[in-house]
Image: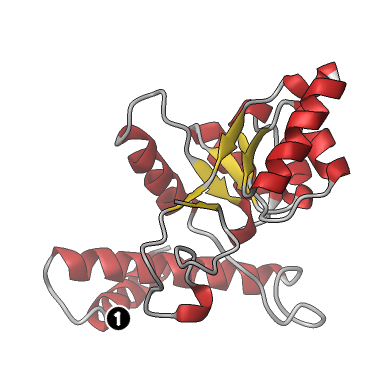
Amino acid sequence: GNECERKRKREGEEVWSMAGSDGEDGRVLGARRLRVAEVLSAALRRGDVLGGDRPCALFYDLSAFRAGCRELVDAFPPSAVHGFAVKANPLLEMVREAREIGLGAECASIAEVHLALVAGVPPAKIVFDAPTKTVSQLRFALSAGVHVNIDNFEELQLVAGLREAQHACRAASVGVRINPQHGAGTIVETSTASAASKFGLPL
């Protein structure tokens, strides 16, 4: 009734005031915080999301996620393939959300390849680019039509041999990951373009 509406209005005003700004950014931030508060309140009321043996939970803003994905897709020509990094969010439903918007899947392990396939990502839009791949993993990916990125000459020889020996392994496209060797970044341990990097063939 009216009391609930007044309570909601008071809560909204409190959240808006937390934003610390009366401008557009402040209103957007305030509205977002209000939405988060409503989601958490609903989760607590349900009882089967948080509480007891469920002390924590993850919540995703699907509107923001979809908007970000669409912005990325719209910024490039239709021929571009965008790979959702599965390792960053290996949840089946999130991979499906990305697929429905037009993203492919970038997979750093064979387990992620299987997840992407279950999520319905077309094999040709799955990029398997783990820095180390076994023969059986390569055979599976190539036979399934998954795009494979090569990281070294030894792997290139393996792929060439599989494609020559087994017709099914010729279904997939194959790429070569290049290491431009621009040098280490701010964090040396996580840099991927240094001479010692395990990612890609050095130029």
Place of residue 78 in the rendered image (x, y in percent of width and height, measured from the top left): 39, 23
Eyeballing the image, is 127 above or below 11? Answer: above
Q: How is the image coloured?
A: secondary structure
The crowd level at tag 1 (other Cα within 10 Å; few <14, some 14-19, many 20+) is few
Label 1's element?
helix
For the point 21% across and 66% down, the residue is 27
What residue is rendered at 66% in x and 45% in y?
153
Q: Position of residue 22 (x, y in %)?
A: 12, 73
The image position of residue 129, as x and y in percent, is 63, 47
Q: Is residue 140 above or below residue 11?
A: above
* Vertical arrangement, residue 202 with respect to residue 164, above or below: below
> Can you tell which quarter of the image residue 120 is in?
top right
| Outermost left residue | 23
Q: Position of residue 134 (x, y in %)?
A: 83, 49
131 vs 110, nearest the viewer: 131
- Relative to 25, is 33 on the left or the right? right
Q: Which is more toward the observer, 20 or 122?
A: 122
Please give the name of the residue rendered at 69% of the width and 25% of the height, measured from the top-left corner: 172
Name of the residue lying farthest toward the top? 167
Which residue is depicted at the point 77% across and 48% down?
A: 110
Image quadrant in which the N terminus is located = bottom left
Q: Which residue type carries mark 1? A: Glu
Residue located beneath label 1 in the image: 14
**Compared with residue 62, is residue 6 higher up or lower down, i.e. above or below?**
below
Residue situated in front as seen by the camera: 75 or 138: 138
Asked whether the viewer can see residue 119, the reply is yes
